[in-house]
Amino acid sequence: MPTLVRTHRAVFALVGVAVAAILAVSGWLMMSAHARPQPRPAHVAAMPSGLPSAAATATPAPSTPPVIQPQQLTIPRLGVQAPIENKGIDSHNQMEAPDKPFDVAWYPFTSRPGSGGNAVFAGHKDFAGVGPAVFWKLGQLGPGDTIQVTGADQTQLQYEVTQTWDYTLSNIPMASVLAQGNGDQLTLITCAGSYSRAAGYDHRLVVRARRIA
C-alpha cells in the first residue's frame, strides 16, 4: 500500500463498527492508498478404580507464555525480517501506518504478543517511490507457514498461520478481525486487490496465526 492519503496520514481510516468495547475507540480500519505504486512486479486427571477421589491430582498446566514488547517480525517463507514500530490513533481518528516501507506497525491497544490475546500488525503492500514493500508477498502465506515475533529481550514467539481472508474494502468484518479471547494469536493486515489512483486498493488481506511456541 502506497503512502497514506494525500497528507501521508494513517493507512487505516477508522470506520464505525462495534469494536469500542475491545479497543476503547469508536471505530477501526479502512486502509486507503492514494499514490500509484511503482510498476508491479483446568482438567482433573481420572483416577484408577478403587482409589479415593481425594487422591486426584490436576494435570500440570502449560507454562505461562512470556509477554514481550515486539521489536521484529520474521516470516521465513517470504524472506521478511522487519523492524516493528509502535503505532496508535492519530488526531484524525485514524490508525497510524508504519513510517517506512519495510517496517511493520503493531498496535499496543490490541494485545501484546504472548499475553493470550490477538496482537494486530499492519504493513505496506507497496510504497510510493519505492515499489513493493514489506507485505508485497503476504498473499503467498497459507496454513502451516510460520511467523516469528522477537521481543526487546530477544525472546522469540512462534506462530503458525491458520487462515487467510481476502475481503472487499466495504465488507471487512472488523469485529471478527480484532476479536480477543480466542487464545494467543496474531493478525497481519495489508492492502490487496486492484488499485486505482482515485480509490486506492479495493481489497484487504488478513492473515491469522496462532502461537505454537
Image (tube, grey):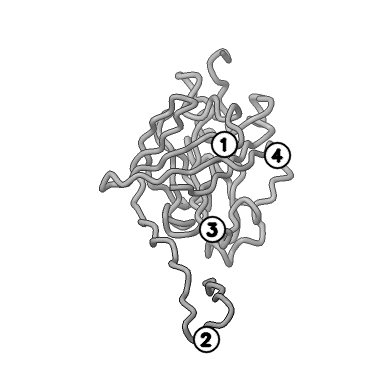
Residue 193 in the image: above or below residue 164:
above
Report whether 72 appears left or right of 15: left
- Disc 1 to disc 2, how far (Cα)? 44 Å
Could you tell me which secondary element the residue under label 3 belongs to? loop
Task: Answer whether labels 3 and 2 touch (C-beta < 8 Å).
Answer: no
Task: Report the number of discs.
Answer: 4
Instruction: Say which amino acid is labelled 2.
Output: Pro
- Residue that mark 4 sits on: 167
Q: Mark 4 packing: few (<14 Cα in 10 Å), some, or many (20+)?
A: some
Extreme residue in the front direction? 50
> Measured from the top left, where is residue 79 in percent x and y?
44, 24
Instruction: Say which amino acid is labelled 4.
Output: Tyr
Q: Which mark is residue 144?
A: 1
Depth check, mark 3 against mark 2: the one in front is 2
Could you tell me which secondary element the residue under label 4 belongs to? strand
Could you tell me which secondary element the residue under label 2 belongs to? loop
> Measured from the top left, where is residue 7 in percent x and y?
49, 36
Depth check: 64 or 31 in front?
A: 64
- Residue located at (57% from left, 36% from top): 144
Q: Earlier in the sequence, mark 3 or mark 4?
A: 4
Q: Which mark is residue 183?
A: 3
- Disc 3 to disc 4, how far (Cα)? 23 Å
- Disc 1 to disc 3, how far (Cα)? 17 Å
> Measured from the top left, where is residue 133 in percent x and y?
48, 25
Task: Answer whether labels 1 and 2 touch (C-beta < 8 Å).
Answer: no
Instruction: Say which amino acid is labelled 1.
Output: Gly
Report whether 104 appears left or right of 30: left
Q: Which mark is residue 52?
A: 2
Q: Earlier in the sequence, mark 1 or mark 2?
A: 2
